[in-house]
């Protein structure tokens, strides 16, 4: 059962239940043919024909970019994201707010982390990786720690700096961490979160970022490591900046990102859409967007709309007992703003949703948009279908190699 509802600018809410997601559209359009390669065929389709939920979380993980930690259950290697920084810099709060939907005010009562915490992010999310939260007081370069093992399987390293505190010691620890990690694994993406900027003015934020950026790059240049690239983000758990920053980090771990961006560009150019995001509903992280610049206000509207979808679905939707979610792949939402802008959300899977921004006059061609969305959904399935086949081929090849090694070892033992 799909729940369709519309929120007007004045706050009026209309809800209707759609028992049949089938749509038959008959029209001709050159724009449609560009996207799907069909010219004179009647536009008739059924979204259930292409069910992306057939792919498991293991199939849709993002481990191909970098080596990671092996999952003992399904044998999938997941990339690691390391959260590092000094004590009380806000590492655990970031993790709780982004992936556990904890209210920012509740993070004030979190106890300080005193041991390494490892968590899998895959049960209620499209993205699949591990987050390792390192306590600030632990010296992981101590001889008793195998830091090479940790960095060898890392996809991204996030170093959190408290912008409201003296960050001289933090920059020293950052330099030591980055230089040693780079020697072990040059493919790590180094990310710096200049955190707790909610209490700073805009000018002060820019000044802090410029100072930290300059000092860090100077230290790397003096060490002869100017080839190391660090990305800097101004973040706070009290607004959506932390979600946007984490989106940029996760995108670097998704090998299909260029393909997804290209598909979104084709979709919006043939549908009269101004901006489109592909969101992971559970974490409100956007895993891809089109090539046009991302506006912070637009991203905040997307996050607010996803919250509305989840809240309304909890009230009117039928819970999905299998996934534990009140919405499904047929859920959709339409919000009309008072500036003639329409926000259109459609679920791609139980984990993924597309959020589009378009003008009211463009939304009048909703049939064309829905058909193009269907083609986009089919293309996404084909992208991951190819990847699943590659993974299966690799698994089969590894099994053959292991069988050959085992057979060879057995022959050698018999000879002796």
Image (tube, rainbow, N blue to C red):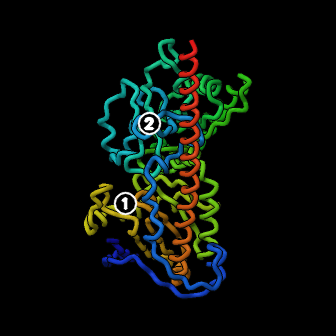
Q: Residue at x 54, y 47 (%)?
A: 392
Q: Is residue 325 above or below residue 61?
A: below
Residue 328 position, x and y percent, is 36, 64
Label disc, if present, on residue 71 of the rendered structure: 2
Q: Residue furthest front?
A: 415
Q: Residue at x 32, y 77 (%)?
A: 19
Give the residue number, with chain letter if any, for mark 1. Answer: 307
Q: Quadrant of residue 412?
A: top right
Q: Nearer the viewer, residue 341 or 252?
A: 252
Circle count: 2
| Residue 301 in view in this figure | no
Which is in the foreground here, disc 2 or disc 1?
A: 2
Q: Quadrant of residue 276?
A: bottom right
Quarter holding the C terminus is top right
Q: Residue at x 53, y 37 (%)?
A: 399
Q: Nearer the viewer, residue 93 or 105?
A: 93
| Residue 159 in view in this figure | yes
Q: Secondary structure at mark 1?
A: helix
Q: Quadrant of residue 95?
A: top left
């Amino acid at each position: 059962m799909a729940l369709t509802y519309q929120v007007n600018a004045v706050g009026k809410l209309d809800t209707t239940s759609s028992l049949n997601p089938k749509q038959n559209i008959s029209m001709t359009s050159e724009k449609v043919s560009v996207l799907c390669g069909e010219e004179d065929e009647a536009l008739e389709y059924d979204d259930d024909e292409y069910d992306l939920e057939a792919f498991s979380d293991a199939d849709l993980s993002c481990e191909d970019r970098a080596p990671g930690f092996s999952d003992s259950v399904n044998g999938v290697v997941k990339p690691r994201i390391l959260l590092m920084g000094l004590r009380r810099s806000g590492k655990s709060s970031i993790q709780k707010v982004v992936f556990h939907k904890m209210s920012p005010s509740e993070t004030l009562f979190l106890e300080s982390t005193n041991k390494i915490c490892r968590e899998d992010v895959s049960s209620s999310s499209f993205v699949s990786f591990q987050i390792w939260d390192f306590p600030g007081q632990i010296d992981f370069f101590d001889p008793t720690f195998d830091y090479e093992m940790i960095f060898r399987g890392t996809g991204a390293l996030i170093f959190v700096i408290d912008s409201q505190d003296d960050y001289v010691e933090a920059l020293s620890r950052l330099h030591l961490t980055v230089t040693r990690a780079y020697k072990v694994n040059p493919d790590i993406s180094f990310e710096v979160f200049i955190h707790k900027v909610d209490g700073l003015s805009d000018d002060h934020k820019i000044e802090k970022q410029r100072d930290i950026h300059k000092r860090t790059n100077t230290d790397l240049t003096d060490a002869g490591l100017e080839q190391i690239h660090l990305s800097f983000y101004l973040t706070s758990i009290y607004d959506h900046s932390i979600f946007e920053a984490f989106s940029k980090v996760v995108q670097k771990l998704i090998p299909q990102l260029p393909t997804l961006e290209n598909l979104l560009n084709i979709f919006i150019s043939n549908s009269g859409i101004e901006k489109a995001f592909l969101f992971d509903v559970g974490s409100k992280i956007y895993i891809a967007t089109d090539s046009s610049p991302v506006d912070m206000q637009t991203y905040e509207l997307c996050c607010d709309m996803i919250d509305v979808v989840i809240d309304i679905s909890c009230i009117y939707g039928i819970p999905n007992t299998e996934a534990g979610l009140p919405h499904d792949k047929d859920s959709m939402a339409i919000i009309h703003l008072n500036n003639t802008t329409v926000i259109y959300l459609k679920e791609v899977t139980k984990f993924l949703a597309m959020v589009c921004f378009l003008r009211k006059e463009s939304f009048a061609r909703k049939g064309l948009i829905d058909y193009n969305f269907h083609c986009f959904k089919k293309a996404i399935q084909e992208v991951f279908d190819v990847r699943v086949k590659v993974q299966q081929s690799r698994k089969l090849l590894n099994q053959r190699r292991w069988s050959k090694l085992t057979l060879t070892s057995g022959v050698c033992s018999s000879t002796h």
